[in-house]
Image (cartoon, grey):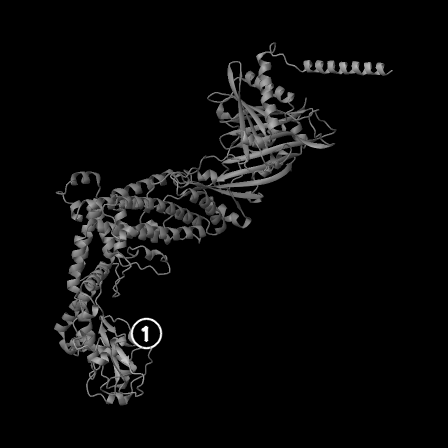
């Protein structure tokens, strides 16, 4: 029994092995007998099995390539050969499952970016096989069908559910045929094509497109009128604002040419308002609007349509009934792409000025660039354009005959003073800005302009005419460049010179009247108590007068902390001498030799000095020693003037009284003395020295009030010295200051732009000022001669300036367009800023902003602003004379209309193939017909997918 059972077991094992061997031979493919067609199918199947086994996530590690847009779509490819031809098979797949809308039977999501085939046929992952040729399409229909059949057989063998597509016909038609095994008894077939011309009028309207879709499943044309089909419908319309006319573009080009050449035909080149007419830079140039146009995208959610009449009504419905609005800006090429340095603006002209600075080192005087005797002048004349005299006259007239344009301190940037240039409203700053646009800003044109400018300045000096655009406030701003300081001082000298001339003329006519006026308040009659009280010094009264006299700082600078009181009648009656030039009483300070209060005198204003004069004075002090030894005549004159004024205001004063008022640190108070008068104390050791020069000057100083003294500054001598400096300044020193001032003035001009308070833009402007101040610091230290690295740094600064200028132009354009919808302006600018700024430091932007900037959703309360952008087009602006599509927006028809029709049905039982592990449940809804329509007024593209039971 045991042996019998063991024998049976052994026989059963042998039979099993034989069956397994037979099964292996059944699945063995003998390719020695297979045709090339069968081997081609097997190669397709092998590649598909490999990709299926690896999986999408692992394919990324195997070299799958991202398409960029959509961002989550990737592809991997393989090359195959059949019948002496090479084919490329590409598998497109997604990593995330976020796009449920692209699956069959689901409504399309217009918001999510999709591949063309995904949108056209409603698929998610798919395969494309095409010949490796120049066009990549198959022109032979039998070949396309045979290729698609091979792919279908291969996919069926490996149980792949991927849709497969083959491109056909001419490449411009973007036509495809395709097939997909649904894993059931159902199969989906795809077909898409394009009508590029002569689109039937019926198919330009929604009613005709609806009937085209219904005709794909209706049994006869009579069904269209008698039956109601529940068709799912969704639509997306794209509108575009009108761009600039060609005439506007040509006019803008001609203006740029005129600005560069300096020629003027006398006509009105600005006969039409520009978008930037109210922008601060419009005085100097017209910028191309960085926003070329806007695209408005309106979307309707999916709805069910049952008749063509509903579609006819849909064509006339207002787009305000659409559920979603989006706006997409279209930027001009110079701001959206890699174009740098080819647009006329401040940055381009500053670059030319830097080039002129580099050439300024070649000669010693500005006249050398104009003189015919200068070596190389012929070459310079041939390459450097100088505008005609009419343009030069117009520039000088604008500079020298226009009134000052004062800018409030609130509108001036806080970091502007860090740049050692002239303020924007001053004469030199305006000259620098004009030089940017004078000719092509070459060194020869700048020299011509400077020489004529100095001639005008000298005329103002000789004729005692006010220097335009220069304040006459009696101060010199040492934080500005030296040329501006010289012009400030010259303006003051002209004013003082004119006052002297007026005073002499009045003296000739009426000397008595002149004498009375000249003393004025400085020779007050202190016998009148009311007049004396009116002349008291207060802390706020220490200011310069219009006549050049200074209300002495006795109570403000030297004893500002001491209290003051009014003078009594008894004090005034006790005066034995006439007091002159008193500005008021210094409270609690009494003269040492008389029981009277000390009076603070009016003093002459100290002489004005520019930066180079201060440096000369300091050098003299360093060479000759202690300033109290009076190394210079100027210090002696100032001290003697103060002593004379003090003596006139205090007739009973002695040297010690003057020291107590003028130099309190040289008077040592006697704290033990409790007497009010005479006050206790003594001179310091330095002042008590017998050889002290101060006492000698005191003894020689006559008692004269400030009104009778000779001015400390001779305006005639100082004015001639200033003109000599301006006429003989070295070219590189002048160009250094012009570069600094031009950068500052250009930045100040752009800073006045109104852009709605965009935080990113404000931060970028702040950074620009600090960058300019840092880059120009070597010029302020006179380090330019021979150092060309500074020139290269300045050229790099011009690139930075151009970037910021672009951003300011864009911010201004968006602010004006979205004045009543600031949220949209901020969102669009922030998107562009985040794209643009990381690429600013690179040589190339490496992308197109028009492709990178996302669309912004428009809220309901912002729709009227967007609608107002679509103005009624004129006859020459219309793209078509006859509007043909419907759904008009202020006379604008859509530039693109996208529609998805779909028909759905239910499966009555569970159909699934052996390889499908996810059988459909009872009453599962499937999409039996789907049609994607994309059309304009000139073409129509239709993509159809049909699910059938094979």
Q: Is residue 27 left or right of residue 568?
A: right
Residue on which the image places disc 1: 540
**Nearest the camera: 744 or 19?**
19
| Helix, strand or loop at mark 1 | helix
Location of the N terminus by quadrant is: top right
At horizontal 18% and vertical 56% (from top left) the residue drawn is 725
**Nearest the camera: 664 or 854?**
664
Can residue 267 be seen in the rendering of this structure? Answer: no
At horizontal 73% and vertical 15% (from top left) the residue drawn is 17
Location of the C terminus by quadrant is: top right
Looking at this view, name the residue that lies furthest to the top. 33
Q: Position of residue 39 (x, y in %)?
A: 58, 15
Q: Is residue 861 left or right of residue 792?
A: right
Q: Which quarter of the figure has residue 76?
A: top right
Q: Position of residue 386 (x, y in %)?
A: 21, 43
**Callout 1: 10 Å neighbours few (<14), some, many (20+)?**
few
Compared to residue 936, the image places residue 434 above or below, namely below
Looking at this view, name the residue that lies furthest to the front. 3
Compared to residue 86, the image places residue 283 above or below, namely below
């Amino acid at each position: 029994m045991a042996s019998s059972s063991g024998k049976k077991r052994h026989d059963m094992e042998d039979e099993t092995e034989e069956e397994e061997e037979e099964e292996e031979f059944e699945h063995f493919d003998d390719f020695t007998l297979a045709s090339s067609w069968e081997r081609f199918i097997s190669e397709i199947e092998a590649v598909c099995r490999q990709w299926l086994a690896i999986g999408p996530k692992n394919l990324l590690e195997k070299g799958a390539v991202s398409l960029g847009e959509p961002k989550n779509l990737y592809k991997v490819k393989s090359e195959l050969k059949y019948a002496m031809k090479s084919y490329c098979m590409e598998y497109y797949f997604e990593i995330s499952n976020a796009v449920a809308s692209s699956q069959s039977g689901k409504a399309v999501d217009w918001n999510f970016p999709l591949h063309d085939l995904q949108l056209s046929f409603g698929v998610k992952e798919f395969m494309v096989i095409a010949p490796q040729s120049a066009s990549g399409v198959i022109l032979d229909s039998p070949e396309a069908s045979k290729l698609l059949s091979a792919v279908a057989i291969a996919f069926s063998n490996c149980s792949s559910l991927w849709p497969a597509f083959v491109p056909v016909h001419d490449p411009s038609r973007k036509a495809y045929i395709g097939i997909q095994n649904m894993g059931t008894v159902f199969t989906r077939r795809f077909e898409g094509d394009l009508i590029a011309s002569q689109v039937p009028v019926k198919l330009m309207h929604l009613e005709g497109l609806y009937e085209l879709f219904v005709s794909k499943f209706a049994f006869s044309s009579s069904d269209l009128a008698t039956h109601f089909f529940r068709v799912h419908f969704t639509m997306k319309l794209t509108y575009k604002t009108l761009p600039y006319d060609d005439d506007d573009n040509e006019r803008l080009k001609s203006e740029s040419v005129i600005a560069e050449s300096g020629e003027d035909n006398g006509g009105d080149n600005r006969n039409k308002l520009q978008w930037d007419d109210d922008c601060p830079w419009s005085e100097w140039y017209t910028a191309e609007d960085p926003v070329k146009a806007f695209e408005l995208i309106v979307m309707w959610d999916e709805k069910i349509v049952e008749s063509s009449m509903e579609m006819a009504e849909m064509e006339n419905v207002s787009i305000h009934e659409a559920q979603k609005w989006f706006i997409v800006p279209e930027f001009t090429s110079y701001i959206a792409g890699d174009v740098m340095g080819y647009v006329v603006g401040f940055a381009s002209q500053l670059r030319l000025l830097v080039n002129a600075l580099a050439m300024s080192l070649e000669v010693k005087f500005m006249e050398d660039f104009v003189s015919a005797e200068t070596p190389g002048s012929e070459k310079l004349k041939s390459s450097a354009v100088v505008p005609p005299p009419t343009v030069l006259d117009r520039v000088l007239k604008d500079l020298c005959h226009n009134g000052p344009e004062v800018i409030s301190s609130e509108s001036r940037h806080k970091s502007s003073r860090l740049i050692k240039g002239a303020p924007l409203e001053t004469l030199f700053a305006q000259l620098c800005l004009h030089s940017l646009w004078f000719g092509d800003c070459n060194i020869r044109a700048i020299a011509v302009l400077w020489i004529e400018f100095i001639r005008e300045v000298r005329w103002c000096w000789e004729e005692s005419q006010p220097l335009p655009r220069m304040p006459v406030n009696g101060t010199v701003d040492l934080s500005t460049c030296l040329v501006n300081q010289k012009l400030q001082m010259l303006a003051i000298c002209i004013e003082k010179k004119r006052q002297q001339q007026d005073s002499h003329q009045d003296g000739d006519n009426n000397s008595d009247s002149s004498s009375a006026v000249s003393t004025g308040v400085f020779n007050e009659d202190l016998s009148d108590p009311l007049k004396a009280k009116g002349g008291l010094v207060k802390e706020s009264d220490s200011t310069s007068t219009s006549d050049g006299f200074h209300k002495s700082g006795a109570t403000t600078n030297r004893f500002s902390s001491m209290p003051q009181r009014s003078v009594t009648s008894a004090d005034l009656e006790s005066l034995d001498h006439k007091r002159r030039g008193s500005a008021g009483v210094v409270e609690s300070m009494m003269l040492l030799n008389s029981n009277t209060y000390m009076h603070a005198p009016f003093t002459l204003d100290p002489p004005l000095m520019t930066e180079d004069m201060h440096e000369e004075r300091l050098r003299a002090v360093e060479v000759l020693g202690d300033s109290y030894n009076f190394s210079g005549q100027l210090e002696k004159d100032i001290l003697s003037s103060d002593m004379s004024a003090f003596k006139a205001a205090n007739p009973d004063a002695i040297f010690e009284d003057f020291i107590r008022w003028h130099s309190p640190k040289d008077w040592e108070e006697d704290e033990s003395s409790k007497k009010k008068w005479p006050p206790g104390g003594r001179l310091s050791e330095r002042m008590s020295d017998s050889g002290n020069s101060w006492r000698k000057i005191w003894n020689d100083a006559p008692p004269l009030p400030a009104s009778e003294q000779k001015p400390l500054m001779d305006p005639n001598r100082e004015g001639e010295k200033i003109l000599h400096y301006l006429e003989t300044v070295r070219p590189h020193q002048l160009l250094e200051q012009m570069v600094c001032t031009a950068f500052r003035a250009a930045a100040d001009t752009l800073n006045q732009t109104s852009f709605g308070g965009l935080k990113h833009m404000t931060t970028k402007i702040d950074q620009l000022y600090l960058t300019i101040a840092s880059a120009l610091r070597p010029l302020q230290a006179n380090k330019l001669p021979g150092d060309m690295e500074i020139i290269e740094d300045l050229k790099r600064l011009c690139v930075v300036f151009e970037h910021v200028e672009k951003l300011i132009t864009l911010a201004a354009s968006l602010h004006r367009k979205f004045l009543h919808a600031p949220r949209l302006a901020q969102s669009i600018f922030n998107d562009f800023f985040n794209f643009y700024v990381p690429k600013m430091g690179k040589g190339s932007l490496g992308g197109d902003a028009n492709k990178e900037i996302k669309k912004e959703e428009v809220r309901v309360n912002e729709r009227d602003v967007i609608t107002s952008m679509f103005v009624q087009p004129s006859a020459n602006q219309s793209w078509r004379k006859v509007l043909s599509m419907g759904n008009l927006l202020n006379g604008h028809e859509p530039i693109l209309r996208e529609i998805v029709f779909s028909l759905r049905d239910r499966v009555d039982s569970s159909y699934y193939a052996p390889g499908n592990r996810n059988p459909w449940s009872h009453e599962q809804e499937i999409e039996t017909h789907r049609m994607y329509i994309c059309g304009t007024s000139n073409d129509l593209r239709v993509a159809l997918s049909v699910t059938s039971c094979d």
